[in-house]
């Protein structure tokens, strides 16, 4: 590709593209392509600042316009001026070349009568002019001999204020002009007759472009919006909002299904026409982005801003889609392996795969299966401890994060507490405290753990009522020598009783009138009478 750049100068600079591959990371072997611009030449002919440039679709010719009130036509390969158009009375602010490639080979009288290629210019004098081009044979000859003087075939006063942009339709049938008078006008290329006026923007129009496939036109305005217009009835069919400042440039992508725009906010935005949504935003420049264009093949995007930078953007959609497809295929394969391991009760392999896939529910399921499998032999904790010793730091942090989430629900707290116990019994506390993020995770686990223990204490304390009732009814087995006091001595609470305000708290319930000495709680008097509920008996 050859890139032509017009700056605040009377000269137009040409650059070539070259790609250099650099290794981004030695560990993952990612290779990133960087595009560099190398100077290829300079087009010198204007006597004042060049304001606008446009290239022919065949890539052989370049048109430039500037403050010297002229438009010049250049042969890119020889870098020679082959034509000069004079006739405007003010600075020429915009220029556009016809888009049909075959018309550039038309010459002679046919070209003069409008059957060949042409250039359109707009000026600060508020006029449009159409300049027929003599054909490729003549233009190639003049690239060696010198320039020719171009004559305007059509001219019209187009707008009430300064014209900012002109654009030619893909079939060369219409010409669009955008002005500071907030309107876009469509002109027939054959006679510069008015086809229609597009009204709706609240500020001046900075750019307008025809769709490569549909009969629609996109416009960019200083009112911070983009609009899509129907050429048939000149009605607005879409409005795109999202820029924080005026929108300066708009282009259709090759497929015609998306738009790319740039604005005074230094941002480049990608829009999907069907959904009317912004798909991506690129913080491209530190100042206004005045220049925006696509390569002919549509794989590269060029942007230039007032920050004196030119950026080249590469379309990575295909690479991202391929990467997502590969990741999805790998994920499906791993999930199938996980299912197979679970079906064959290969829990250790299933645990590794579930952790690699980052699936907390599957990890919980595997750990539950491991604990239940070894429940009868009471080796579930030993199995978890054997795994915990071999977990690396990232895997250990991942497991503890899962436990933090599981512990918030009562039905999953048993597995979470077993995993935490396996970790803290096999890995020294000082080592755990030195790991980044793990102390914070334990700090989040502790409140819920205390709540679960209090709940268990409550359940244990409530179960004494059932035990007392059964003991009062007598032993269910007559030959049993076990008595209630022996059972009480063997029973243990999850947490020891606590003295609260002179009363003993067991399992979340206060024992009224009990002794405050926790050690004496079990030494209750045999003569003490326990009354449950209210007595309905009357004293005689």
Image: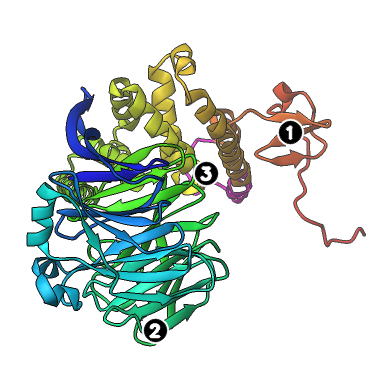
Provide residue 159's location: percent of width, then percent of height: 49, 74
Disc 3 from disc 1: Cα separation: 42 Å
Residue identified by numbered label 2: 194
Q: Circle 2 sits in a helix, a strand or a loop, which is it?
A: strand
In the image, which is nearer the foreground, mark 3 or mark 2?
Answer: 2
The residues bearing labels 2 and 1 have C-alpha atoms spaced at a distance of 112 Å
Q: Which of pointers 3 and 2 lies earlier in the amino acid sequence?
A: 2
Q: Is 420 in front, or is 101? A: 101
Q: Is residue 236 visible?
A: yes
- Say which residue label 1 marks: 526
487 and 262: which is toward the camera: 262
Residue lying at 56% horizontally and 66% vertically, measured from the top left? 203
Residue stretch in magenta = 464-482
Mark 3 or 1, closer to the camera: 3
**Which quadrant is home to the C terminus?**
bottom right
| Residue located beneath label 3 in the image | 408
Most foreground residue, 510 or 125: 125
Task: Tell me the SS state at disc 3.
Answer: loop
- Identify the image quadrant of residue 86: bottom left
Mark 1, other Cα within 10 Å: few <14 / some 14–19 / many ≥20? few
Q: Could you tell which of marks 3 and 1 lies nearer the N-terminus?
A: 3
Residue in the image at 44% along x and 35% along y: 401
């Amino acid at each position: 590709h050859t890139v032509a750049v017009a700056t605040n100068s009377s000269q137009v600079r040409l650059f070539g593209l070259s790609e250099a591959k650099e290794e981004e990371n030695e560990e993952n072997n990612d290779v990133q392509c960087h595009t560099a611009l190398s100077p290829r030449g300079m087009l010198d002919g204007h006597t004042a600042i060049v304001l606008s440039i446009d290239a022919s679709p065949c890539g052989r010719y370049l048109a430039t316009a500037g403050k010297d009130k002229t438009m010049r036509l250049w042969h890119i390969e020889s870098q020679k001026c082959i034509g000069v158009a004079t006739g405007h009375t003010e600075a020429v602010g915009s220029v556009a070349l016809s888009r049909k490639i075959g018309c550039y080979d038309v010459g002679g009288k046919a070209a003069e009568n409008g059957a060949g290629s042409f250039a359109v210019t707009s000026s600060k004098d508020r006029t449009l002019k159409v300049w027929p081009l003599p054909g490729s044979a003549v233009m190639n000859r003049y690239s060696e001999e010198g320039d020719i003087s171009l004559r305007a075939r059509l001219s019209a006063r187009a707008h009430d204020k300064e014209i900012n942009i002109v654009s030619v339709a893909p079939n060369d049938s219409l010409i669009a002009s955008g002005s500071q008078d907030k309107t876009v006008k469509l002109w027939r290329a054959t006679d510069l007759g008015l086809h229609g006026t597009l009204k709706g923007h609240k500020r001046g129009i900075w750019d307008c472009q025809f769709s490569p496939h549909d009969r629609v036109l996109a416009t960019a305005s200083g009112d911070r919006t983009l609009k899509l217009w129907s050429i048939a009835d000149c009605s607005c069919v879409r409005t795109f909002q999202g820029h924080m400042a005026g929108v300066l440039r708009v282009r259709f992508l090759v497929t015609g299904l998306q738009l790319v725009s740039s604005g005074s906010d230094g941002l480049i935005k990608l829009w999907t026409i069907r959904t009317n949504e912004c798909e991506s935003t690129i913080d491209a420049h530190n100042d206004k982005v005045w220049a925006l264009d696509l390569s002919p093949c549509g794989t590269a995007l060029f942007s230039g801003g007032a920050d004196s930078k030119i950026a080249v953007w590469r379309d990575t959609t295909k690479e991202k889609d391929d990467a997502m497809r590969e990741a999805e295929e790998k994920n499906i394969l791993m999930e199938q392996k996980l299912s197979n391991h679970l079906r064959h009760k290969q829990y250790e392999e299933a645990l590794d795969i579930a952790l690699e896939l980052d699936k907390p529910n599957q990890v919980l399921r595997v750990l539950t299966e491991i604990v239940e499998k070894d429940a009868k032999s009471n080796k579930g904790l030993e199995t978890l401890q054997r795994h915990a010793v071999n977990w690396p730091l990232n895997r250990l942090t991942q497991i503890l994060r899962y436990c933090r989430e599981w512990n918030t629900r009562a039905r999953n707290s048993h597995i979470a507490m077993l995993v935490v116990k396996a970790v803290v019994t096999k890995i020294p506390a000082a080592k755990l405290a030195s790991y980044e993020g793990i102390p914070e995770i334990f700090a989040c686990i502790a409140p819920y753990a205390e709540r679960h223990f209090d709940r268990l204490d409550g359940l244990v304390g409530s179960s004494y009522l059932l035990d007392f009732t059964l003991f009062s009814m007598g032993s269910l087995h007559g030959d049993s020598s076990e008595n209630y006091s022996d059972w009480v001595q063997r029973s243990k609470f999850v947490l020891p009783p606590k003295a609260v305000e002179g009363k003993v708290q067991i399992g979340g319930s206060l024992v009224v009138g009990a002794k405050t000495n926790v050690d004496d709680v079990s030494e209750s008097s045999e003569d003490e009478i326990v009354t449950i509920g209210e007595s309905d008996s009357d004293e005689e």
